[in-house]
Amino acid sequence: MIYDAVEAAEREALLGPAAVLMLPLKARLDLRSAQEKMTSGLFSKLGDGTVLAVDVAELPIDPARAYEVGQRIAASVNRARLSGYLLSVLPREIYKRCCAFLPNHSRHYVILPEFPGSAEGYNGLLDQARTRLGADCVTLVRGGERRADGAFLVETRDGEQHRLGAPGLGADGEPIEGPIFLADDVAPQRGDVRHPDAVFVHKAQTVSRLSAKVPAANGICLNYPTGIVDPAHELLLEARDTLRDSSLSPEAPVFDAAMMADAELAYSYLEQAEMNATGLALTVRKQINGKSFNNSEITMWDVGSLILGLLAAVELELAPADRIYRRIKKIMASLPVIQDGDAAYPPTLINVRDASIERRGFDACDFARLTSAVTRAAQHTALADASSQLMGKWQIAGLMQGGVLNNILKTRIQSSYLSHCAHYQTRVLPALGQSETRSPYREAFAGETVADRTVNLLYTVDKIGILPTEPLLLEYVELGPSAECAVLTDVFLGAMKHHFDQTGQLLAPSETPIDTAPWFVYQGFDLGHETRWNVSYRKGREVVFEPVASSPYGIFSTKAAYLWYAVRPCRHTRKMLDMAQEHARIDGFGMSSGLFLDGYAQMKNHADLNTNGIVLQALAHLKRRTR
């Protein structure tokens, strides 16, 4: 049963002997429309003061099994810095059945000058403290240093450190247990000490002087493992620790002759795939037994990658600039524009051979990529007029709604807000006069500390879905990193290295065309599923999610490897680059789209425009950094 914002007195009357989870979330929920099953979608909408009552008669008698049940429920609930509470509505006789089911509840910390020297002496002292306080949930600690943030820092006999104070995340992301009450100052009837997460601190020279001034209604603790892992918080701490690894320490970027050869190979794809009539390029090329299989449909994202790759080729001096500029002008002149009332925009899909429209509609993410390319082209004197003329044809004000650029699908209008492209759009669209755009990243990146802001941002990333390398690192290369981009890049890099340390598997995840059905896969960082790195693809109408590590469609993306080294050069990203350089080159053809993670075998004779254009972008950025 779920109760929304129930008053304390009503809650006691309604729930009776029940285990209770309190979820301090921000959003509100219309309970009448909620499904009667626990899902992350349901719990992400609950509000402050919401309680979940679980019938303890349904819990296993075995505490270990009860703990497993609680973990499963918690996994569906978290996503919002879950705090779970065991309230004092439980009769003591059934407490054992659900104590392990719930995460946080009050504890007693006894600060001693020093621990006894022997285990026997320590255990005897602990039993004595439990008897005097009338509670099992007692921890003997030493220390009690008061930190600048007001928290006490204490240490157990095993060396484990705890911070006690105002509950939440510290500035470094470590949790602080609380709220804290100094037991000698607590009045027996003081209502706020019944907070289910209360921490009572006893300072005593000897245990024999302890006195229990805490109301018995706070309950007890049987010392089962009670921490519920919040995936965002866990990831934050992992990334922070992993980023200290020397293999992730920043190094001076290197651009050498081998990288120049890679640039020449990537540019050869753009040249060989060129359509003379339009300047556009085949988006995928595959050769089997001497026969070519090509994709001649192109999205505006790929048009953007083509233009940006050609601009990178100018910077890398891979061909005469005038020749490349003529091709870019031809591309811009060939792009069709759909007139739709007061709006004018490029279509979703066109044919590279004659620029005819293959699919009407509008894709906001792809449009942002194209806009980024055209605004960068406008910085070249030779392309300024052509760029201005093209952007002058676009009229997107009518597609904006509440600061969000809408997609136009076959049968409906769809907001582009809840996407990993939305933040990238906010960096690009001001060039078209749309400065008041909304970003889910920016709106989530709020809190008093970097830790708070990071965890809030990760919840939003989870809500959106799998986070790939693009457009995250493209923001670095094209626009410079925003604060949100820099934080996510840190977490992403730390998570990739953590996966490598745990499994030995080197990742470079991104969305990628592949040379077999289902032909295109999305892969990346995924907080919303049991495994952290997942592949997503369509199987008929079904969307399938599989762990990257075991999926036959797990891909090491060539463009991701080059982007990561260009943006964050270090020993680990150099390892990624070395893998791509060793296995992804297809001489005389271009850079392969990627490698299958199972053995890092190449997608043979399979290359695509987006990969080769972005490889050129990454290499130009890298060369720029070495000047």
Image (spheres, rainbow, N blue to C red):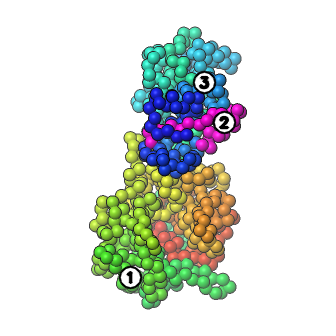
Check disc 3 and report the residue beneath it: 91
User: SS for tag 2?
Assistant: loop
Check disc 2 and report the residue beneath it: 59
User: SS for tag 3?
Assistant: loop
User: SS for tag 1?
Assistant: loop
Q: Residue at x 55, y 59 (%)?
A: 524
Residue 608: percent from the left, percent from the top? Answer: 54, 76
Question: Residue 231 bears which disc, if any?
Answer: none
Q: Is any part of residue 558 visible from this angle?
A: no
Q: CA distance from mark 3 to mark 2?
A: 15 Å
In the depicted view, which residue is nearer to us: 281 or 217? 217
Badge nearest the viewer, 1 or 2: 2
Check disc 1 and report the residue beneath it: 336
Q: Residue at x 44, y 19 (%)?
A: 190
Residue 165: percent from the left, percent from the top? Answer: 46, 28
- Pointer 1 local density, CA inside 10 Å: few below 14, some 14–19, many at least 20: some
Q: Amino acid at mark 2?
A: Leu
- Pointer 3 local density, CA inside 10 Å: few below 14, some 14–19, many at least 20: few
Q: Amino acid at mark 1?
A: Pro
Residue 617: percent from the left, percent from the top? Answer: 46, 70
Q: Which residues are magenta?
A: 47-73
**Of the residues under marks 3 and 2, which one precedes in the sequence?**
2
The quadrant the C terminus occupies is bottom left
Q: Residue at x 58, y 27 (%)?
A: 90
